[in-house]
Image: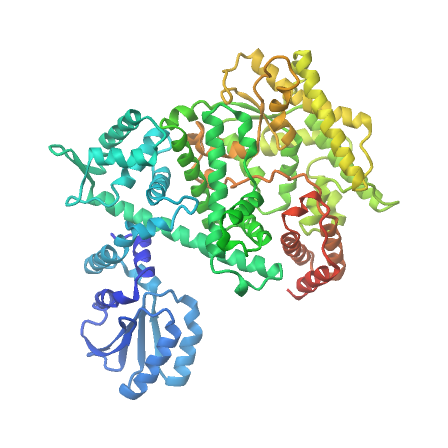
Amino acid sequence: MVSYERFKYALSNLDGRQWRLFEILANTFLSEEFPNLRPLAAAAGDDGMDASLFQATDDPDTVLQYSVRKDWSNKVIETCDRLQITQPDTNVLIYVTNQEIGAAGNTLKKSIRSKYGVFLDMRDREWFLTQRNASAKVTAEAEEFCEKVADPQLFGNSSIDRQAKALSDLEAKAAFVYLGLQWADDMREKGLTKLCFEALVRSVLRDTTSESRLSRQQVREQIAKLLPAHHRATLDTQVDGALKRLSKVYIRHWQKVDEYCLTWQERLRLAERLAEVSLLDDALTAELRRTIQVTAQEMGIDPSTLPAQTLDFTRRVVEKVLLDRGEFFASAVTSDNAGSFVSFEDVEAVVHKEIAQNRAIRGLEPRLLVASVQSIFLNSTEEVRKCLRSLADTYTLFAFMRETPDVQSAVVKIFSDGDIWLDTSVVLPLLAETLIDEPARSHTHLISAAKECGLRLYITEGVLEEVATHINRCRTYMRSLNQEGAKGGPPFLLNAYSLSGRDITSFLHWLETFAGMRRLEDDVADYLLDDHRIDVKDLTTESDRADQELRAAVSEIWHEVREARDKKNEKLGYPPMDPITRSKLVTHDVVNYVGVVVRRQDRNERRGAFGYRSWWLTFDRTALRLHEDLKNRLRERPPASPAISPDFMLHYLAVGPVRSRISRRTEETLPLMMNMSVLDAVPRDLLDLADALRVELTGVPANVVSRKIRDTLDEARLILGPNALGGDAKLTDEVKARLIAQAKAR
């Protein structure tokens, strides 16, 4: 049986100079339907023929054209013009091509019928794919076609070189590609060290056959070049173990000369898998191209003026972001330094860094690149998300292999069972995500995966109070809008509701989803438990028993941070927070941080940066960096940080000890990155634009208004760019007017 992906790759990547192979393939596929075909004519093409014309001797009014030309529409018209002269009795033209036509050919069929009186029957790429295993003869021809067209490309250097854009060395790219294949194919229970070295051995043996083998020493040396920082004897031991395991099924071993090659079955399997990877890669490239064009248009940039290398550079930035995060995660785990993971660069920093290092692309607009990369991470199709998820996991594994040859030992240092307390900054987005479609609910997917792998999720009484207070503040803010006017910026949930495109008059009704008017905290607790299995478990008792010097230092740091935030808000015109509220919020943060620390001590949890079972999941950068700040304030070394970020949790779920408990489907839904500024202020101009659109769209059905507002605000976010995170970015009146006009015209 010939696989769909491998045959599709062969048809899609057929070179025009390989026209004869396609002619033989087409004749075989059509031989049962037209057993007697005679050559009628041939037209010259680039470096040879690009098409062949046949006539069915038993059906002389039917003509068959085989063509590999990409401009199939023009070729059909040229053929019909020629047939009017050479074969005027033709009633049926069967156009056979390796190109993808589908529904795009319907208009041409009508035109050909009207102008030439000829019925056009188009057999395109999908027709071949459907018929590929119709008979033994067809299957054999399709297999031979794949061996001659697909396999040399799939196993060749050119195919490998197109992959792993964040890497430069060809052998490193090959190792990356085969590591990704191994990660996708192997059982979840297999140790990561075994998985990684088996992938490396396969990558080194990728070009081998029974006539072209590699010795054990050659395999060892090539893998040693890939991992030069590691002890050679250790590497050789791991390579020998992988060769022994793979020799049972996947590779052949000539024991007398101690040489190896891939088995024919393994080469065939790898070819099929490489074809699948290539198709996913094509989908990612196509989505990136579309995203860049749409983003450029929304920013008022003519896509035709963009430099030729824009697409390739954007793809490199996408993969560089994934590599950077994988490297920071691997470095943090292998060095037992939980705080080091916080320092990875965001998308904007990577873009500027790459532009600075590459003079050839300095003419690119950074704002366009940042918006395009962020869009591909957050708003991709399911197929593209699957591709990106695979890239992210593979870059993480690749980073681990560079750090240590024993990946499994490094990873098992991370907790495999845990109690996780969630910060308010993690809980509020769960509520907001009920406003968006399920595939885009990144925080919800993260929490669902954590529950699936057996982690227990909690919030403290203080976080519960903060969430309930936030809901109450939203209601108060709405009432003040209808009366004397609101003071300060709108709360996060109100922002989220407004920016979702919904009618703001229904906001209070939506809040009823989470809590009523009388028992807010009880209602919120019930909602979190019922919908997310997040229970309330306070840490005040533990916090009260903490070392007083530690508790005082943690409290002092948070008071300083809160005061700095107040000063920033005052500059924006917002009233300062009252001292009582500020003190209460600081207490809540202290209870979370110090309470988890004491709980670890009470339970004698395992030492090591990531071996503890009790953790605090938070977006708060102060919490994530507090351990480093404490070093300068305490006489003794501070206890290990209890705080981990959602981005760390993503990597932990994907490649950590709990990965075997997560289904493939759940893993594919994991987001690529989390929004570290999810609770930042929303630019006032976006809220004003949403209000203006509602007025302009009066009388339009509510669901249409919601969609138009949502789509228009997405465009406005791109125009404002990443610098809008501070909440003070501006849209000109001209841009606002254009956006409103576009929304009305849709």
Residue sitting at the far front: 359
Residue at the spot 63% in from the left edge and 20% down from the top edge: 630
Q: In this view, does 131 lie to the left or right of 104?
A: left
From the image, which quarter does the C terminus lie in? bottom right
Residue sitting at the far left: 256
Q: In this view, does 201 lie above or below 708?
A: above
Q: Is residue 575 left or right of residue 532?
A: right
Depth check, front residue: 345 or 40 = 345
| Residue 27 lies in quadrant | bottom left
Q: In this view, does 105 lie above or below 61?
A: above
Residue at the spot 34% in from the left edge and 32% down from the top edge: 228
Position in image of residue 276 (x %, y %): 35, 50
Depth check, front residue: 365 or 625 = 365
Is residue 378 in view?
A: no
Residue at the spot 32% in from the left edge and 80% down from the top edge: 79
Is residue 731 in view?
A: yes
Residue sitting at the far right: 484
Position in image of residue 633 (x %, y %): 66, 18
Depth check, front residue: 239 or 7 = 239
| Residue 636 lies in quadrant | top right
Position in image of residue 707 (x %, y %): 64, 56
Name the colouring of the figure.
Answer: rainbow
Residue at the spot 65% in from the left edge and 41% down from the top edge: 432
How many numbered circles does the render carry? 0
| Residue 299 lies in quadrant | bottom right
